[in-house]
Image (cartoon, coloured by chain):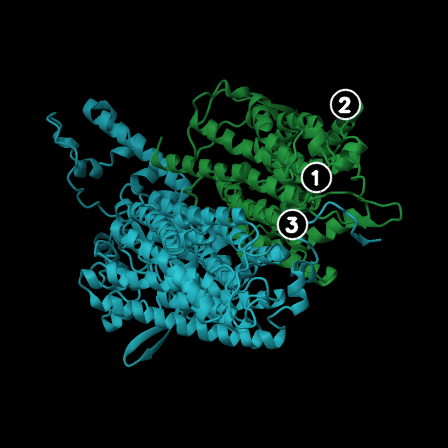
Amino acid sequence: MRTAMKAQSAGLAMLLAAGALVAHPRAAEAKSSRNAAVSVSPFGGDNSEPVRRQVTRLMRGRGLSVETSLPRVDDPTQYPSLAREHHLAAFLTGDVETRKRGRAPARQTVTFVVWNGATGAQLGRWSATGAPRRLPSVVARGFFKNLGRAFQAADPPPSPPSPPSASPPSPAPAPSSSSPAEKEAAPLAGSANVNDPPHAALSERSLVELTNQVSENHKLGMSTQTALNIVWTLLTGFLVMFMQAGFAMVETGFTRAKNMAHTMGINFLVYSIGGIGYWAVGFALQMGGVGALSTFGNDATLSSEFVMTLFGKDFGLFGTRGFFLSPEVYTAPVAALFLFQIVFMDTMAIIPTGAMAERWRFSSFVLFTFVLASFTYPIFGNWVWGGGWLSQLGHSFHLGHGHVDFAGSSVVHLAGGVAALVGAKLLGPRIGKYDATGNPRPIPGHNMALGVLGTFILAFGWFGFNAGSTLAGSDTHIAVIAVNTMLASASGAFAAYLYMKLRYGKPELGMMCNGMLAGLVAITAPCAFVTSPSAIFIGAVAGVLVIFSAMYIENKLKIDDPAGAISVHGTCGAWGILSLGLLADGRYGEGWNGVPGTVRGLFYGDPSQLVASLIGIIVCVAWVGGVTYGAFKLIDRLVGNRSSPQDEMAGLDVPEFGIEGYATDKGDVPTSG
Amino acid sequence: MSLTQSVNLLWVLVGAFMVMFMQVGFAMVETGLTRSKNAVNTMAMNFTVYPVGVLGFWLVGYGVMMGGVGGWPSLGAAFPGVHEVAITLRGYSFGVFGASRFALISAPHDASNLAMFFFSVVFMVTSATIPTGALAERWRFAAFLIYTAFVSMLLYPLYGNWVWGGGWLAGLGITAGLGHGHVDFAGSSVVHMTGGVIALAGVLVLGPRADKFRRDGTVAALPGHNLPMAIVGTLVLAFGWFGFNAGSTLSAADPQIATVAVNTLLSSSAGAFTTLLYVWHFEHKPNIGMVCNGLLGGLVAITGPCAFIGPAAAVLIGVVAGGLVPWSAGVLERRFRIDDPVGAIAVHGVCGVWGVLALGLFADGTYGADWNGVAGNVRGIIFGDPRQLLAQTVGVVANVALVFPAAYFFFRLVNRVFGNRVSAETEAAGLDGPEMGAEAYPPG
């Protein structure tokens, strides 16, 4: 979610540097304590970037810290000063040579040289040859076999003086135990200090600690903080995945028994169809240009955005890396991001199914979901979360921090609601929903228990949805986000109850469920940026808004929305975005979208943030509405969107699926001979 | 204990909680896909397998399975007092079963052992619950309880020891030079294939349900009574499976957890989608119950190889599994007249075999350094190591050779002593009243 976040891993950055791959653990510890990196500057020759990326990945995979930002320096005599300045242990240079002989396929040879940081001497040299597309994997096979020793031999530069110790100064007369002196003397490497009792106690303890830490990092090759962030992202992603079960239960509970298998089947298969489409195309379009992932160890694999320049300003349109998650982009951080993003896409794609239930042809649904997952959703997602132009509005037009959507009120919910609105309008109401004079008739759902349980599963999964969107378990703001989420859902359900009770004399269970979901949808965008009274307010407004909206859509617009998806996700999604522009309190979001300062809404002094939010809403409605309209019309031509009236009257389960949702125990249906 | 070990413990425990939650998924899938007159019985089997299995595994099973493992470095320090019973042949030792830490008596407060016990026991329960689907609607409840004790104490731990407890299948790389030995990341063979093979043996002994195969040669469909329950249960399983696979790194600090989770996701999607196309094409209707099984088939197949392959291979594995499930279910039912109410043999047995073999094909050499004590990463035949495929095949053969006869003779023995099957009248009336004394859906 966060395209520009403070680099917060600095404190716990890789403890382990050049020594990680060394066979002798003692030597490894001595070097690793200095936290020195290896510089990998751009390689020479055509098409050398894939090899460089591969090498960087390999080295990071072995626990080396890699510095890629330095330009190439061809004069080895400059290396010692550079090494001191940037705290480097070694330099890796590479040159790629491409040969093409006649009609034979081209071959590439890459030559690596490892230089010692401290002296500028050459430590190792290795060449590998292969077809251009195979070269990175050839390199992967032999890199450490041939150059491992060279890295092992690299000397880190003298350590800069350590910061003063946090512990109170010891009165003991041990002047030589000050940290710089201790490190210069490299006490870890030998047993010299054991003879000296005060030093022995100190160095042995630190030796044990360091050995534990180093040997773990050696095995794991990743900082604990990055690990924690990836664990957090994965666990919350799993929670969001579980929301699929909640959606399936809510939508099926609120529709009729004769369409049960059909409604369930649609909800079930969104996960599968969407997953394939998003893997193939969608993820690359959405996140291919997101840049360095600051909470995942600054992995910069996804850094290719298609940008259009208009009026001298850059407009990022879509990403171009990561199609089919090909091997060269499949790093652990990218995989974690992918998992988190794909379950968000599933949530978006499942929303229209509730509005179009009980009359939608299954094959039309399959095609429609494919378009949503691989094109409609990812493009808008790129504009907001992938470094695209809506997120850059602050940077390029000074509108607050650009369009800010913390966890997806617009990207996921408003977009889903708009797709639902367009789809339900084009599909028309269910037979029997409106009588001859055009008055709506209630069509009650068949299993309220299923609907209520599903609502609770959604509310549970929503903690993953919102709090996980930090992409960082080490960001303590997750607690604020979780509490805001909980408060808004509670006040949404309660407001819906109060309104129905006061207005109609009876609480309405289905509306209470929708009120809770409405509160959740609305708090999704502002959850990280508002105070707790604001969260209660946002939820309460959403809980009432969802009822007004549902009645307006049913009575005035004459659009039939069986599960209330348009009101819950569309209307309250727009409210959530607006509420961020109004109520963001300036306590979070430092440097969000590359704009200095924190995120503030209209009531806290930044009216331009509200303008950016409004633009976000308008663009979302225009883009999703337009594409959905075109796609839906086209699919209607191809396979037909609506099931036949006879099937609809009989219930879609048997005609479309060949089974009954609730089969009786007769068991007399022969299938074959 | 270091911070990293704490995070790893947390990861393993949360993963285990998710796997424990899969019991809910199994109960829902199996009950939803069977008939309402047997709903209480089917639910009760899925429920009881948990307490009985946990106690059996605690008492004996854990010691047999993990008694020979010295420790798990990602979770804590090595543990003294391990014992693996091994046969020595030609100077190599072949581990057969572990024999320490029975009832956890010698490790009452050792965090790494307790976490591993928890993680292992929920895996065992998953395996033990698989046959309840295949044998549903006709199995005596008391016979089922005896079966649970047998599987949790002996059968599952024995094969588990061979693969994960330092036994001879894991050692094939060292003793016979076969790749890294039999590699099964999260249990395509240990958990799923074992469950599927037991299910097959059980169905062969118990026979089909009374009204499944008619005299005139036709097959009755006997549709399940509550499809929403089955579909929600499938999604619960798919959720818990992330704990199953990603938790099996036993380390949160291993960046591979992200790869594992994404591969799991992709394979399940590909499995469901392929089955959808398959049944839509051959049965002219997108039979959603079978599509659920396709998703599960993709999950079962990716369980073994999930850490060792790339996303394209994950999709391919899911596609093949999604085709195998409906095909093998059809063949088993129509050709071999095997009555498997929920498709457990096709999903867990067939796709389990496929998953283990797929590792031998597609492992791409980017992960698994020093796996089972063999230097280098794990590679399949396509990436240059045909011996890995051989090791996988040996693992599959060993599983069938151990589990099938053991389960078959066990079921025969119970038949002789006690009786596995309810009476014909009970079966016709439904098991809920006569066996359980309760109705799932009392009128009114």
- Residue A589: percent from the left, percent from the top? 25, 57
- Depth order, front residue of A161/A109: A161
For numbered disc 1, what is the local secondary structure?
helix
Q: Amino acid at mark 1?
A: Lys
Q: Which residue is mark 2?
A: B418
Q: Is residue B261 left or right of residue A9?
A: right
- Depth order, front residue of A125/A25: A25
Which of pointers 2 and 3 indicates the residue nearer the eye?
A: 2
Distance, label 1 to label 2, CA atoms, is 24 Å
The residue carrying pointer 3 sits among few (fewer than 14), some (14 to 19) or many (20 or more) residues within 10 Å by Cα, namely many
Q: Colour of chain B?
A: green
Chain to which the residue tagged by mark 3 belongs? B
- Residue A142: percent from the left, percent from the top? 48, 53
Q: Colour of chain A?
A: cyan
Instruction: Evaluate whether residue A581 shows in this view.
Output: yes
In terms of sequence position, does the residue under pointer 1 or pointer 2 come before the other?
1
From the viewer's perspective, is residue B59 above or below residue A291? above
Q: Which residue is mark 3?
A: B293
For numbered disc 2, what is the local secondary structure?
loop
- Residue A430: percent from the left, percent from the top? 57, 66
Q: Amino acid at mark 2?
A: Phe
Distance, label 2 to label 3, CA atoms, is 33 Å
In the picture as drawn, the residue positioned furthest to the right comes out as B216
On whether disc 1 and disc 2 are found on a single subunit, the reply is yes
Chain to which the residue tagged by mark 2 belongs? B
Q: Which residue is mark 1?
A: B37
From the viewer's perspective, is residue B88 above or below residue A636? above
In terms of sequence position, does the residue under pointer 2 or pointer 3 come before the other?
3
Q: Is residue A193 left or right of residue A129?
A: left
Report if the CB atoms under discs 1 and 3 are less than 8 Å apart. Answer: no
